[in-house]
């Protein structure tokens, strides 16, 4: 120690040696707040189908639909009026069944072509058949002149024969209390108003004389047998039409044999009477 050092100086130096200087506080830099990471961009939601309808009830928001695949078609816009429930509509699945055309209504078989009453004047071997139209078959009366016997069979298979001597079998009376088929003034008359009751009939003439057929509209024709035998005309109802045919028969044939050949068997006639009282 130098001699010129004063006691005060020595004390100061002593204190400096004894007291260890404290290091300066180190200030820590505040951590810099990191910038918030931006959320990944959300997948664009499928655009809801524009709705032009008016919602009167039910939830106004539709449930989020799962993301549609890339190849899916866009939903069609809705133009309907929603009155309740969810406003979202399920897409209609395409029908796998091909459209079929409706089946045509079945048609009934038509009869073969035949001459009409306007085209025929005489039924003979060349033109033995004539077919009446529905109007001629249902209006007025069918009048056959020159007949000596008539045979009928109804749809209920009631059969009868009428001649100049009387009636054999069961007569058929219409609701107007008029016979369905009978004689009037020498002519055989079929009431066409009730033609739906008849199934078939026979008109038998006299040998050497023709049968004449007259309709309500003035049309008429004859039926003659060229061999000189008695002309026989058969009548058959087919639907709403009547057909008349000249039948070729031997010159002489009894009436009972004629009925058997055509399959007619007169129905026994039963007279209705009131029940007996004791």
Image (spheres, rainbow, N blue to C red):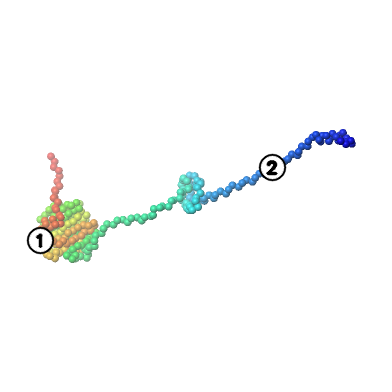
- In three-dimensional space, the C-alpha distance between marks 2 and 1, rounded to whole angstroms, equals 145 Å
Q: Secondary structure at mark 2?
A: loop
Q: Are the residues tagged 2 and 1 within 8 Å (C-beta)? A: no
Snapshot quadrant of residue 255 = bottom left
- Place of residue 118 in the rendered image (x, y in percent of width and height, measured from the top left): 22, 64
7 to the left or right of 36: right
Q: Residue at x 14, y 46 (%)?
A: 273
Decide: is 277 above or below 229: above
Q: Which residue is mark 1?
A: 252
Q: Residue at x 56, y 48 (%)?
A: 42
How busy is the neighbourhood of tag 2: few (under 14 within 10 Å), some, or many (20 plus)?
few
- Place of residue 102 in the rendered image (x, y in percent of width and height, measured from the top left): 34, 55
- Place of residue 13 in the rendered image (x, y in percent of width and height, measured from the top left): 83, 36
Judging depth in this view, the residue of 154 and 105 nearest the camera is 105
Judging depth in this view, the residue of 67 and 264 nearest the camera is 67
266 to the left or right of 9: left
- Place of residue 94 in the rendered image (x, y in percent of width and height, measured from the top left): 43, 52
Q: Residue at x 20, y 53 (%)?
A: 155
Q: Which residue is mark 2?
A: 30
Look at discs 2 and 1 and give the one toward the viewer: 2
How busy is the neighbourhood of tag 1: few (under 14 within 10 Å), some, or many (20 plus)?
few
Q: Is residue 188 visible?
A: no
Q: Is residue 224 visible?
A: yes
Snapshot quadrant of residue 203 = bottom left
168 to the left or right of 51: left
């Amino acid at each position: 120690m130098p001699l010129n050092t004063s006691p005060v100086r020595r004390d100061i130096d002593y204190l400096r040696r004894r007291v260890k200087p404290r290091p300066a506080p180190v200030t820590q830099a505040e951590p810099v707040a990191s910038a918030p990471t931006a959320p990944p961009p959300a997948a664009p939601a499928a655009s809801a189908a524009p709705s032009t309808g008016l919602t009167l009830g039910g939830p106004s928001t539709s449930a989020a639909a799962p993301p549609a695949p890339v190849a899916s078609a866009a939903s069609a816009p809705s133009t309907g009026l929603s009155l309740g429930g969810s406003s979202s509509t399920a897409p209609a699945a395409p029908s796998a069944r091909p459209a079929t055309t409706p089946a045509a209504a079945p048609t009934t078989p038509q009869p073969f072509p035949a001459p009409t009453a306007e085209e025929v004047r005489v039924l003979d071997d060349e033109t033995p058949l004539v077919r009446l139209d529905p109007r001629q078959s249902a209006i007025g009366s069918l009048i056959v002149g020159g007949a000596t016997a008539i045979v009928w069979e109804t749809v209920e298979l009631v059969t009868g024969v009428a001649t100049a001597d009387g009636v054999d079998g069961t007569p058929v009376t219409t609701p107007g209390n008029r016979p369905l088929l009978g004689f009037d003034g020498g002519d055989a008359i079929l009431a066409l108003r009730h033609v739906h009751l008849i199934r078939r009939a026979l008109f038998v003439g006299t040998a050497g004389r023709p049968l004449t057929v007259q309709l309500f509209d003035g049309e008429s024709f004859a039926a003659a047998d060229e061999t000189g035998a008695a002309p026989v005309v058969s009548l058959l109802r087919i639907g709403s039409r009547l057909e008349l045919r000249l039948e070729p028969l031997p010159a002489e044939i009894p009436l009972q044999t004629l009925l058997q050949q055509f399959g007619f068997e007169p129905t026994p006639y039963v007279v209705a009477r009131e029940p007996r009282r004791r």
